[in-house]
Image (tube, rainbow, N blue to C red):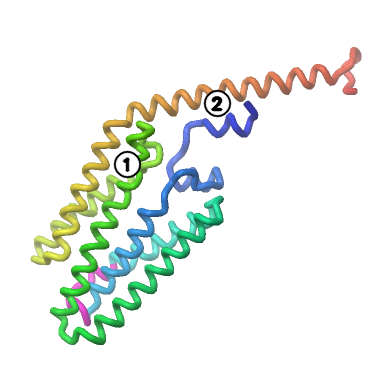
């Protein structure tokens, strides 16, 4: 086993540091970040004064979310080693931008009352909010198949749970059904992910420990081979041939 291959098995670091260190997105999916991006864009539209007045918190929070998700997606594009994968992500981002722009145009030009605009954009926002919470579930098949949560970041699931709980509370306080419903369901999705994480956590540690052991064995083999090569390269006087 070569050094490069052996190092591949060493225990892996947190997601984005790991991606930067290895220069590859490996088996991580862009789906959660793409879903979060379109979700934030739709909620910014929902919170605009001409759509749903007095929703400054919704606009500022999701506006920040757009900036963060764009940063994540740019990193994903930089470190993706598959040209087709990059094109697919760029294509989805383009479709999302066109969709939100079209939705904005139609709502502002054909729905003249804020309550109608709130209803239309709110229904769309519910759909994308649920999609955002459900997007990490795409990794659950991989988790169940491999019996490892290696590619299902704990922080993402945990923060999703906190996000769902707090926004559900906000929806209750404001009596806003459009905020309460998707975030209530999102809390359940995030809880399911955390339960799956807890189920396979110990097995994941075992798998990573085995990989680390193989890596150490592989590295020792490389060092041994290098030592033999160096010895064979010396003549009786200790001079390289």
Q: Quadrant of the C terminus?
A: top right
Vertical comparison of 99 with 218: above or below: below
Q: Residue at x 23, y 66 (%)?
A: 125
Position of residue 185 measured from the top left corner of the image (x, y, whole percent): 17, 53
Mark toward the viewer: 1 or 2: 1
Position of residue 91 measured from the top left corner of the image (x, y, whole percent): 45, 65
Q: Which residues are magenta?
A: 50-60
The Cα–Cα distance between marks 1 and 2, rounded to whole angstroms, is 27 Å
Q: Which structural element holds mark 1?
A: helix
Q: Which of the marked residues, 1 or 2, is nearer the chain's N terminus?
A: 1
Direction from residue 91 to residue 3 in the image, left or right: right
Q: Which residue position holds label 1?
A: 140
In the rendered image, residue 213 lying in the magenta stretch gets the answer no
Q: Residue at x 33, y 78 (%)?
A: 102
Q: Residue at x 42, y 65 (%)?
A: 93
Q: Residue at x 27, y 74 (%)?
A: 45
Q: Which mark is residue 215?
A: 2
């Amino acid at each position: 086993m070569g050094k490069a291959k052996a190092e591949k098995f060493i225990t892996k670091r947190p997601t984005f540091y790991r991606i930067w260190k290895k220069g590859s997105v490996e088996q991580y999916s862009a789906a959660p970040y793409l879903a979060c991006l379109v979700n934030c864009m739709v909620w910014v539209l929902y919170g605009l004064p001409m759509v749903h007045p007095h929703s400054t918190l919704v606009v500022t929070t999701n506006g920040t979310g757009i900036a963060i998700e764009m940063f994540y997606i740019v990193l994903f594009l930089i470190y993706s080693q598959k040209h087709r994968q990059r094109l697919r992500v760029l294509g989805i981002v383009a479709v999302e931008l066109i969709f939100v722009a079209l939705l904005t145009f139609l709502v502002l030009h054909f729905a003249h009352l804020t309550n109608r605009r709130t209803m239309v954009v709110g229904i769309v926002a519910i759909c994308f909010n649920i999609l955002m919470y459900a997007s990490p579930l795409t990794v659950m098949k991989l988790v169940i198949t491999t019996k490892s949560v290696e590619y299902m970041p704990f922080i993402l699931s945990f923060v999703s749970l906190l996000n769902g709980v707090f926004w559900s509370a906000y929806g209750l306080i404001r009596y806003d059904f459009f905020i309460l419903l998707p975030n209530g369901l999102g809390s359940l999705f995030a809880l399911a992910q955390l339960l799956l994480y807890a189920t396979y956590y110990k097995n994941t540690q075992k798998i990573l420990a085995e990989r680390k052991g193989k890596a150490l064995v592989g590295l020792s083999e490389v060092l041994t081979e290098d030592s033999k090569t160096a010895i064979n390269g010396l003549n009786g006087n200790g001079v390289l041939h």
